[in-house]
Amino acid sequence: MKESESEFKSNKTLLKIRDLNASYDASLILKSINMDLVEGSVMALLGRNGVGKTTLLRALMGLMPKTDGSIEFTGKAIENLRPDQRAILGMGYVPQGRDIFPNLTVKENLDVSMSISGQAGREQLEFVYDLFPVIKEMLSRKGGVLSGGQQQQLAIGRALLTNPKLLILDEPTEGIQPSIIDQIEDSIHRLKNESSISIILVEQYLDFAKSASDNFYIMDRGSVVQSGESKNLSIEIIQKYLTV
């Protein structure tokens, strides 16, 4: 994507997080998180294992037992909404581990999403097939017999059929072969170029994250410790916050 294109299609803030805390029982996991996501952009959410990245995604989707602070999505306060209400507003979530329905066929997995989104989802179907041709080739196969990479493509495709404004991807390259990693990166670039979808990308593969994203936030011990444009993600920052 050319730099001029990466100035996003809009300067409007899609997602605004302010002073967000989240806890499991008495354990405070997220500490005063502040983030902004601009419409049409890709944010890389980075950090070592166990720093709170997945917890933040769960908090955004309303899946944490206890949170405080504010979350605005499309200008609406959503911190008190249920997960299904957030999804209806346009938040699509592909969790770590994919969470497809293994005993349903690929087509049935897709039908579940389209039953929620209706005509808007059906209009996205050909785009999803074009993005991930393997999905169309394997419509009659059970989801559980697909390779890890194929399941990941199905999970992303299924999320796209909910017609989201925001697509949240948690470790989409984990445990999959390099050729499919390349396809997923290509799909993110296409979504940036050909749609208005914004993306939050949690990723350990730094070259992938830097190439696919416009800006980054780095977390450590439940807090944001660094942020900026992805082109400025330097060796010094990586060594300080991301190397083991």
Image (cartoon, grey):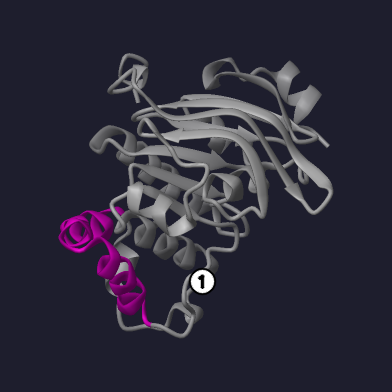
Above or below, comparing residue 45 to residue 59 in the picture: above
Question: Mark 1 sits on what residue?
Answer: 147
| Residue positioned 72% across, 19% down in the render | 237
Q: Is residue 106 magenta?
A: yes
Q: Is residue 133 visible?
A: yes
Quadrant where the C terminus is found in the figure: top right
Give left or right: position of 241 versus 196: right
Q: Is residue 215 left or right of residue 134?
A: right
Specify the farthest residue to the front: 80
**Residue 127 at x, y = what percent?**
22, 54
Q: Is residue 144 above or below residue 132?
A: below
Locate the N terminus by quadrant.
top left
Residue at 50% across, 50% down? 181
Q: Is residue 118 magenta?
A: yes
**Residue 53: x and y, percent?**
66, 42
Q: Residue at left 19%, top 59%? A: 126
Q: Main secondary structure of the magenta part?
A: helix
Q: Amino acid at mark 1?
A: Ser
Q: Which residues are magenta?
A: 105-131
Residue 95, picture quadrant: bottom right
Residue located at (37% from left, 82% from top): 105
Nearest the camera: 201 or 116? Answer: 116
